[in-house]
Image (cartoon, rainbow, N blue to C red):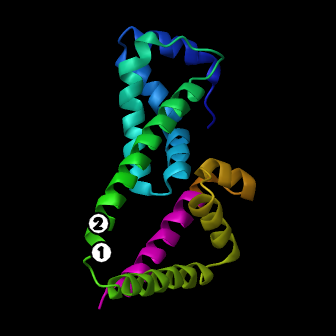
């Protein structure tokens, strides 16, 4: 179900006045798009989830000063999300710099082992996805690889929202099982 942006100005005004209900409505309307913006910027589910939550925490703190331009609150939330993602990327770079200093004392064999494990994991994922039907493979591609929401993928494929949700859940379980098998010694 698509969000009607025409009510965003009212929701923002009410949230700016302290209405947690109005802010929750904005959260529900935009949590998915904000998550996918964060995910595309960070390429990591956990970081994207964290940045999504940070985005809405910052939005709650700053909503009182917001003068909504246009009908949708998404551009404002996307800007906050991009700033939070940039902070996360800078933190990652700092962590990598610290890790690089420590890695100089670790033998090079560790990197080779990680590459072999990563290759085995990628191969297991590909095998798991190859073993499903064409519709399931397309659902996985759209939702997991390209970031489509269930509803968008369903519309594109001409199936019900529940079909996409249920099949993707089964595919993810299958992939998790395949990945877990590669991790067990």
Which numbered disc covers residue 135? Answer: none
Prevailing SS of the magenta stretch? helix
Could you tell me which residue is drawn at 48 percent across and 69 percent down?
A: 172
Above-or-below relation of 23 to 39:
above
Could you tell me which residue is drawn at 34 percent across and 52 percent down?
A: 94
Above-or-below relation of 134 to 72:
below
- Residue 125 lies, in percent from the top left, at 52, 79
Above-or-below relation of 140 to 52:
below
Nearer to me, 106 or 70: 106
- Residue 65 lies, in percent from the top left, at 44, 11
134 sits left or right of 22 in the view: right
Q: Which residues are magenta?
A: 164-185
Nearer to me, 23 or 81: 81
Marks 1 and 2: CB-CB under 8 Å?
yes
Cα distance, mark 1 to mark 2?
A: 6 Å
Could you tell me which residue is drawn at 41 percent across and 41 percent down?
A: 87
Which quadrant, please, contains the N terminus?
top right
Instruction: Give the image quarter of residue 104.
Output: bottom left
Q: Residues within 10 Å of mark 1 (few under 14, many from 20)?
A: few
Residue for badge 2: 101
Nearer to me, 167 or 19: 19
Under circle 2, the secondary element is: helix
- Residue 45 lies, in percent from the top left, at 44, 56
Residue for badge 1: 104
């Amino acid at each position: 179900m698509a969000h009607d942006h025409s009510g965003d100005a009212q929701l923002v005004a009410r949230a700016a006045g302290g209405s947690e209900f109005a802010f929750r409505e904005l959260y529900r309307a935009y949590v998915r798009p904000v998550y996918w913006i964060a995910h595309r910027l960070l390429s990591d589910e956990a970081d994207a989830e964290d940045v999504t939550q940070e985005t809405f925490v910052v939005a709650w703190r700053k909503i009182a000063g917001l003068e909504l331009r246009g009908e949708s609150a998404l551009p404002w939330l996307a800007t906050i999300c991009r700033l939070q993602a940039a902070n996360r990327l800078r933190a990652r770079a700092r962590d990598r710099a610290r890790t690089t200093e420590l890695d100089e004392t670790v033998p090079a064999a560790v990197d080779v082992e990680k590459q072999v494990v990563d290759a085995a994991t990628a191969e297991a994922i590909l095998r798991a996805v190859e073993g499903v039907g064409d519709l399931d493979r397309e659902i996985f591609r759209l939702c997991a690889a390209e970031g489509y929401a269930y509803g968008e993928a369903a519309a594109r494929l001409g199936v019900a929202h529940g079909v996409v949700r249920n099949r993707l859940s089964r595919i993810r379980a299958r992939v998790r099982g395949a990945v877990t098998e590669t991790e067990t010694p």
